[in-house]
Image: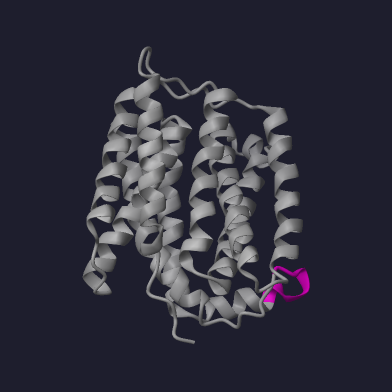
């Protein structure tokens, strides 16, 4: 439990720093970019020319390594709530590096995330077995196809609604990463390559990363990140408890629910610190 929680918190630190760099790099790429297979290569190349974006990519990959450890050792609801601490990290960095000041409400949100995570940690039972679940695997694949189609449609618009929708789809993509990581089987290399989740995991992550970058181009960071944080936390948590047998300690359900709500609400308040101030252009 302690190793998994430590890995989740380490990942949160890296993700919190990377979020600022990703927004900086994404906003230097033309906003007419869209999720179109014919243009996707050019869009990715343009992003990779931005040093800030490359830095965000490196930090996200390192963070995922730690997050993967947490996903394999902890119940999904605890692993995902731990990642919400990235918002606290970004908020604290913003006060140092960007002269942003936290109000009393926002400091309360920082405390709420920490207390909520503590409640989740003490109420968490054992994680369910990492077993194959063919129905859930098919669901992840179907979900990826739907995310790609909806993402391509949403990216054609520069309207604020597309910002929120792209953020929501990015959150579902990151949820697919968490679920795929839990479904991966321990076994031989041949079995690993034959498992569909070996491929849904990186595809989900790459798609979510691009969709979030597109969302950051089109509107405020708050509008892009709020649905992403909500969906990437709530979806795997529900799947873990109701499908993969993640346990809550007997009699601790009220504390677990309270901890989840505190972390979620605190995270949403801190969402506006996910990046630098809006670009004057």
Q: Quadrant of the N terminus?
A: top left
Up/down of 153 relative to 118, above or below:
below
Q: Residue furthest top?
A: 250
Which residue range is magenta in the image?
35-41
Is 34 colored magenta in this rendering?
Answer: no
Task: Depth check: give the residue in front, 119 or 6.
Answer: 119
Which residue is at a point 60% across and 83% down the rendered structure image?
A: 30
Q: Is residue 18 left or right of residue 230?
A: left
Up/down of 51 relative to 237, above or below:
below
* Quarter of image, res 80: top left
| Mark count | 0
Which residue is at a point 59% across and 60% down the rendered structure image?
A: 164
Q: Residue furthest bottom?
A: 281
Task: Depth check: give the residue in front, 232 or 132.
Answer: 232
Q: How is the image coloured?
A: one colour
Up/down of 217 relative to 18, above or below:
below
Is 39 colored magenta in this rendering?
Answer: yes
Residue 202 visible in rendering: no
Main SS class of the magenta portion in the image: helix
Up/down of 116 relative to 208, above or below:
above
Which residue is at a point 35% across and 39% down the rendered structure image?
A: 262
User: Where does the image place residue 118, in percent across and percent down from the top left?
Assistant: 28, 34
Q: Is residue 227 left or right of residue 34?
A: left
User: Where does the image place residue 115, in percent across and percent down from the top left?
Assistant: 26, 37
Residue 152 visible in rendering: yes
Q: Is residue 127 left or right of residue 102?
A: right
* Quarter of image, res 244: top right
User: Where does the image place residue 152, in percent across and percent down from the top left?
Assistant: 74, 64
User: Where does the image place residue 270, in percent across and percent down from the top left?
Assistant: 36, 56
Which residue is at a point 35% across and 33% down the rendered structure image?
A: 259
Q: Is residue 19 left or right of residue 232?
A: left
């Amino acid at each position: 439990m302690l190793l998994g929680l430590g890995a989740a918190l380490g990942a949160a630190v890296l993700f919190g720093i990377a979020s600022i760099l990703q927004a900086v790099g994404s906003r230097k790429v033309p906003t007419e970019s869209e999720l179109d297979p014919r243009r996707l290569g050019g869009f990715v190349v343009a992003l990779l020319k931005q040093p800030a974006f490359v830095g965000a990519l490196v930090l996200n990959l390192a963070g995922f390594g730690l997050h993967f450890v947490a996903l394999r050792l902890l119940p999904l609801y605890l692993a995902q709530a731990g990642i919400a601490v990235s918002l606290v990290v970004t908020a604290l960095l913003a006060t140092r590096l960007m002269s942003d000041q936290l109000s009393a409400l926002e400091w309360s949100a920082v405390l709420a995330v920490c207390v909520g995570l503590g409640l989740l940690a003490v109420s968490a039972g054992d994680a369910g077995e990492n077993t194959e679940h063919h129905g859930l695997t098919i669901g992840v694949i179907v979900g990826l196809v739907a995310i790609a189609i909806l993402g391509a449609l949403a990216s054609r618009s520069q309207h604020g609604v597309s910002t929120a929708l792209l953020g929501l789809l990015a959150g579902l993509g990151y949820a697919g990463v968490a679920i795929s990581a839990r479904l991966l089987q321990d076994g031989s290399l041949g079995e690993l390559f034959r498992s569909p989740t070996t491929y849904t995991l990186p595809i989900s992550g790459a798609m979510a990363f691009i969709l979030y970058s597109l969302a950051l181009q089109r509107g405020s960071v708050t509008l892009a990140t709020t649905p992403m944080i909500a969906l990437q936390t709530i979806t795997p948590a529900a799947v873990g408890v109701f499908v993969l047998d993640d346990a809550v300690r007997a009699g601790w359900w009220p504390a677990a629910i309270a901890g989840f709500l505190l972390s979620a609400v605190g995270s949403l308040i801190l969402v506006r610190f996910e990046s630098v101030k809006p670009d004057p252009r």
